[in-house]
Image: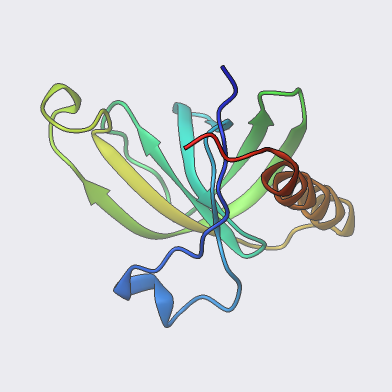
Amino acid sequence: MNQLSIPEVHGQAYTRDRRKNGRYREMHLLVITGRGTGKILDIGSDGLSFGCLYHHSFPAIWPLDIIDARGVLLKQLRVRKIWERNLGHPDLTDGFALEIGVEFVGLTPRQENELDILLSMQISIDIKLPCLL
């Protein structure tokens, strides 16, 4: 069964005033960090948020990779931690022990282009897939 990715601007009060660009909720993107893998919850041209199954300690700035279920890979994107939310034990919540929000910092022109392509692919998929709800 295909998973649908529905574009929607992340409208939580703590992020609405700070973001210049909208975010898209994703169902098939992962981040790979030096501390493990996390599921991307939303992504935009300025940053992303992701969930972790286990508690980790992240530095203020670090590199991460983004991998798409279709094989798209963006490597060594530098990010800065903006917020962190401890959710408790993953068995007692919706599956994540920790959520992290980051912004991209110092991307190369190539990385910016690759990110733009990835985001345009998400929009294209959202428009082309029929709604099954």
Residue at the top extreme, as displayed: 1
Residue at the bottom extreme, as displayed: 17
Q: Which is nearer the eye, 14 or 80?
A: 14
Q: Which is nearer the eye, 126 or 73?
A: 126
Q: Residue at x 70, y 45 (%)?
A: 122
Point out residue 131 in the picture as x, y percentages from the top left corner.
58, 40
Relative to residue 35, is residue 132 drawn left or right?
right
Q: Quadrant of residue 67?
A: top right
Point out residue 65 in the picture as x, y percentages from the top left corner.
65, 35
Q: Residue at x 72, y 51 (%)?
A: 123
* Image height of 30 relative to 123, above or below: above
Q: Residue at x 76, y 51 (%)?
A: 115
> Quadrant where the N terminus lies?
top right
Point out residue 37 in the picture as x, y percentages from the top left corner.
48, 26
Relative to residue 14, is residue 71 drawn left or right?
right
Point out residue 114 in the picture as x, y percentages from the top left corner.
83, 47
Q: Which is nearer the eye, 77 or 112?
A: 112
Q: Which is nearer the eye, 3 or 93?
A: 3
Q: Quadrant of residue 69?
A: top right
* Image height of 120 relative to 63, above or below: below
